[in-house]
Each structure stands twice: as structure tokens, then as C-alpha cells.
Amino acid sequence: MTIARHREREGVTVGARPPGRPRRTHLTVALVGVDGAGKSTVSARLTGVDLPRPVKVIYMGVNLEASSLMLPTTRLLLAVKKARGRRGDLTASPMRDLDHQPGDATPTGSFKESARLGVWMLEEWLRQLVATAYSRQGRIVVFDRHFFADYYHADVHEGHVARSPARRFHGWMLRRAYPKPDLTIMLDAPADRLHARKPEATVEWLERRRRQYLELAAVLPEFVVLDVDRPLDDVVADVADLIRSSWKARV
């Protein structure tokens, strides 16, 4: 779906709500963007902002150690891995496939990868079910990252790279069955500025990843690009204004 129209103000580009979308009294908001954009910082600040409803923040990323929500079996597996001195990753990061070019061959996968990804999909649905429960309680649910956005170019987008059957199924699930956020806000800044904040990847990689996030404007229903190369208070205020406007449009 393409964006019907845009309205612009300082630091903000807003995709309009498509005609015909039903009005609702609940709202889910995803903060997405390249590492260093401030997703966790901004989402945490929103819990103290005056908004139409209380905010519940849910981490929707692949780093298990950053999430308080996980299946008991996953928590046990994570504890065992940490006790053995291994990393706590349950599944491979979606970033692993993003350096491939369209048409490149990638490994066809293995039973171990399929099993790990199967467990990971249960984790994705667990967080979504918790989000739905909070939303029905009247909370505004803010996602710190979102699985659809992070996995889009690795597993969802057709024709990017060859994928294993498990990853194709994962992409199908995210595209066809997994709920999309009502409002997606991409926290954006020039790649060199993001690198200065978090220099764990090259400027070139950050720029490539940044452009991939920008492409989500064509596939997510209400997509906003927000310039975060400004004081944090201004960014938080703009995010809050966008949430208020989106909520107002649904009541």
C-alpha cells in the first residue's frame, strides 16, 4: 500500500491513514529504525508523558536479554546457555541475510534451524498476545522494534534472497497472519550520526539498513519518518503528538 498523502512539519513526515480504515479505541505503535536511533530511550520516556491512555512498552526485538517476556522453556534454555558461557541468542538475527544481494544463494537450512525458528515464532506470538491483552485493557501499546519491520527484508520480502522452507514460512506468517502496528514511527537520522551514537556497524551498513526501513512506508498502513538528530525532549514530544493524533482519529 502506498501512502495516500503527506503532511510535513519540522523533522516529521507523516503517512496519512488510508480511507476506509475502521475507527477504533485502541492503538498499537511501533518505534523502528537503525541501531542508535533511540528506540528504547524514547519508548521508555513515553510512559511518563500525558497521553490519552496509559502506555505499556513491549520489546519486540531478537535480543532475549532485553525482553522480560518469554516462554518458561525459553527462559530455561537461556539460563542454561548463559551458565555454559554462551550467548543468549535463541535464533539467528535477521540482520545476517541483509548483506546478500537479490539472487544470491543462501544455505537451505537445517533441522536445527527449523526447530529454533519454530520456537522463535512461538515467542513472537507470545509477545503479540500480551500486547493484545494490554490493548483490550485500554492501554496504548508501544513496541520497541517490531518483528515485521526487522525481518521484512530477510524473511518477508519476496525475491530478496533464497530462503529455507522454515524462513519462507516465517515470512508468510509475518506477512499474512501477524498483526501489524496501527502506527509505525521510524526514528531516523543520517548514517554518520547514528554511527557516532552506536559505532557497532559501519556507516555504509547503517545507511543500507536505514534505506531498507524507509521502504516499509509502502507496506505498512500508517508510517511516519521522524528526524531524531535533535534534542531528545523534542523527539519525545513529537512522538507523543503523533500518538495523540492517531488516537484522536480512532475515537
Image (cartoon, rainbow, N blue to C red):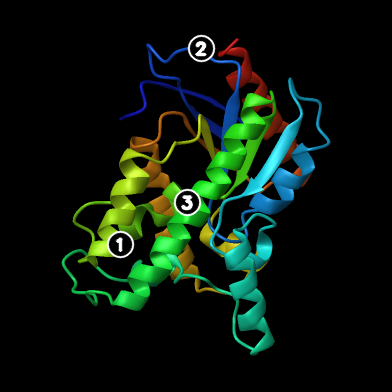
| Residue nearer the viewer, 231 or 123 | 123
What's under tag 2, amino acid-wise?
A: Arg
Q: What's the residue at 22%, 74% (across, down)?
A: 108
Report if the CB atoms under discs 3 and 2 are less than 8 Å apart. no
Q: Which residue is mark 1?
A: 167
Farthest left residue in view:
103
Q: Earlier in the sequence, mark 3 or mark 1?
A: 3
Quarter of image, res 249: top right
Quarter of image, res 63: bottom right
Q: Give the spatial CA distance, label 3 vs label 2.
A: 25 Å
Quarter of image, res 77: bottom right
Q: Earlier in the sequence, mark 1 or mark 2?
A: 2
Q: Which residue is mark 2?
A: 23
**Visible residue check, residue 10:** yes
Q: What's the residue at 57%, 51% (across, down)?
A: 60
Q: Quadrant of the N terminus?
A: top left
What's under tag 1, amino acid-wise?
A: Arg
Q: Give the spatial CA distance, label 3 vs label 1.
A: 13 Å
Q: Quadrant of the C terminus?
A: top right
